[in-house]
Image: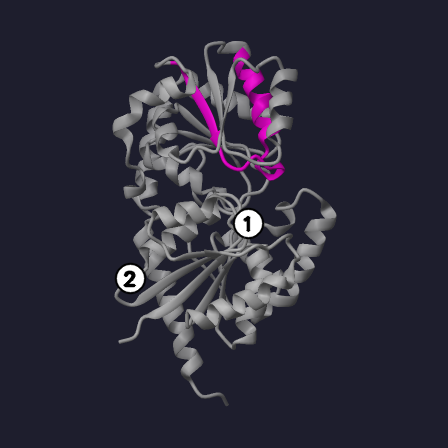
């Protein structure tokens, strides 16, 4: 039986939850039934990460989010690889790969990873992206949302048939912990110092200014605590200046992009997710795997993962006072922190990579079977 040839298309200029999801799909699809390929539309770290994992990857050069000149390149790539189904992730891919696949009459799957209006630094850019997305969204045979929260938005954006498939994580990703003792030296942190961290893109949607304000408040009563900001993005300099203005620059460590986040998670005492919008919050699952208590904003799909007082603490978005109070509570109450962490480990089991892959593969097969059916 011929393998189903699937092309995953994504921007690729950074590595966040969507990119980790794509890598998991490329690595995890049943190799007896599927042949996965990856197209990155921008030069960035995803290409190298994919190559290092043995994924067949091609990088194009999309100069800006509305650069349509890559469409002929995508059409040629899809024809050359004899692609059966195209799976798009993010606004760049949604625009160009949907048009390309439509031109070739290929079925299209789109995954909605986040609220599109929150993904841009300017309202004008967000408005333009949403307009273009609405024009091409109806061409998708199926639209996957990574949480139930995103279902109404996907339909508002023009999705005709939607399904929620939660992200899953492969525990095998979290290897390399034998080098754990070295991370303290790498980061310049004394072993045993209480650590509160946040991991993600340094982007306004992640609410990191509120995290720094909460860190200042926590420092007043817990002066020995250190705070980690793990990730890269357009706000890095602003956030560094914010930490300086709050007089906590000596307590906050900006690591930049850190590929082995499992080593960071392993040494954290608390993970904080201060987002003002969040499709699901993949890093929450990663923290749960390590049994780490979490403090997270009650936004988007986060409450579908974190149950307040059961496996984490939820706070209103944009409220550094309550965020600080929740962090301090966990620092003071080790029994509560341990209970939430243990419950999180059990909750993690409900979001397996195997379940995500099984449902996605079934969806691909259903779509191709529908294509074979004669029309009315």
Task: Say whether residue 312 is magenta.
Answer: no
Tag shown at residue 30: 2
Tell me where the magenta segment starts and ends, as one range.
193-219
Q: Position of residue 309 (x, y in %)?
A: 42, 32
Tag of residue 190:
none
Check the image and report above or below for 191 versus 25.
above
Relative to 214, say whether 121 is above or below.
Answer: below
Q: Position of residue 162 (x, y in %)?
A: 50, 64
Nearer to me, 313 or 143: 143
Crowd around label 1: few <14 · some 14–19 · many ≥20 (10 Å): many
Please state the horizontal and vertical placement of residue 112, each as a whole percent of the image: 52, 55
Indicate left or right for 290 with 211 as reference: left
Badge 1 or badge 2: first in the primary sequence = 2
Relative depth, front residue between 335 and 132: 132
Which residue is found at the position 43% from the left and 38% from the top? 284
Q: Which image quarter: residue 315?
A: top right
To which residue does mark 1 refer? 114
Q: Are marks 1 and 2 in contact (CB under 8 Å)?
A: no
Percent x, y for residue 195?
A: 42, 20
């Amino acid at each position: 039986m011929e393998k189903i040839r699937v092309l995953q298309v994504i921007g690729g200029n950074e590595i966040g939850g969507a990119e980790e999801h794509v890598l998991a799909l490329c690595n995890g699809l049943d190799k007896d039934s599927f042949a996965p390929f990856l197209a990155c539309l921008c030069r960035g770290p995803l290409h190298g990460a994919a190559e290092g994992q043995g994924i067949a990857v091609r990088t194009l050069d999309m100069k800006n989010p509305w650069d349509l000149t890559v469409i002929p390149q995508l059409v040629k790539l899809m024809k050359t690889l004899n692609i059966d189904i195209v799976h798009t992730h993010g606004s760049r891919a949604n625009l160009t790969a949907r048009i390309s696949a439509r031109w070739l009459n290929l079925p299209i799957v789109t995954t909605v990873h986040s609220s599109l209006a929150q993904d841009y630094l300017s309202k004008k850019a967000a408005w333009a992206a949403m307009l273009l997305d609405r024009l091409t969204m109806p061409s998708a045979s199926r639209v996957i949302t990574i949480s139930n929260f995103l279902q109404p938005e996907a339909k508002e954006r023009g999705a005709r048939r939607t399904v929620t498939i939660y992200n899953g994580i492969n525990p095998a990703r979290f290897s390399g912990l034998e080098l754990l003792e070295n991370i303290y030296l790498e980061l310049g942190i004394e072993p045993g110092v209480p650590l509160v961290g946040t991991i993600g893109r340094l982007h306004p949607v992640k609410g990191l200014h509120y995290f720094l304000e909460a860190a200042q408040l926590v420092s007043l009563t817990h002066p020995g605590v250190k705070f980690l900001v793990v990730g890269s993005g357009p706000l890095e300099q602003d956030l560094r200046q914010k930490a300086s203005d709050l007089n906590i620059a000596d307590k906050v460590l900006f690591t930049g992009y850190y590929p082995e986040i499992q080593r960071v998670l392993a040494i954290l005492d608390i993970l904080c997710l201060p987002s003002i919008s969040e499709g699901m919050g993949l890093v929450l699952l990663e923290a749960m795997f390590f049994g780490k208590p979490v403090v997270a904003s009650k936004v988007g799909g986060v409450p579908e993962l974190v149950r307040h007082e059961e496996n984490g603490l939820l706070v209103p978005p944009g409220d550094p006072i309550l965020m600080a109070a929740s962090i301090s509570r966990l620092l003071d109450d080790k029994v509560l922190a341990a209970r939430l962490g243990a419950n999180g480990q059990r909750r993690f089991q409900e979001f397996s990579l195997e379940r995500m892959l099984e449902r996605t593969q079934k969806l691909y097969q259903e779509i191709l079977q529908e294509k074979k059916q004669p029309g009315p």
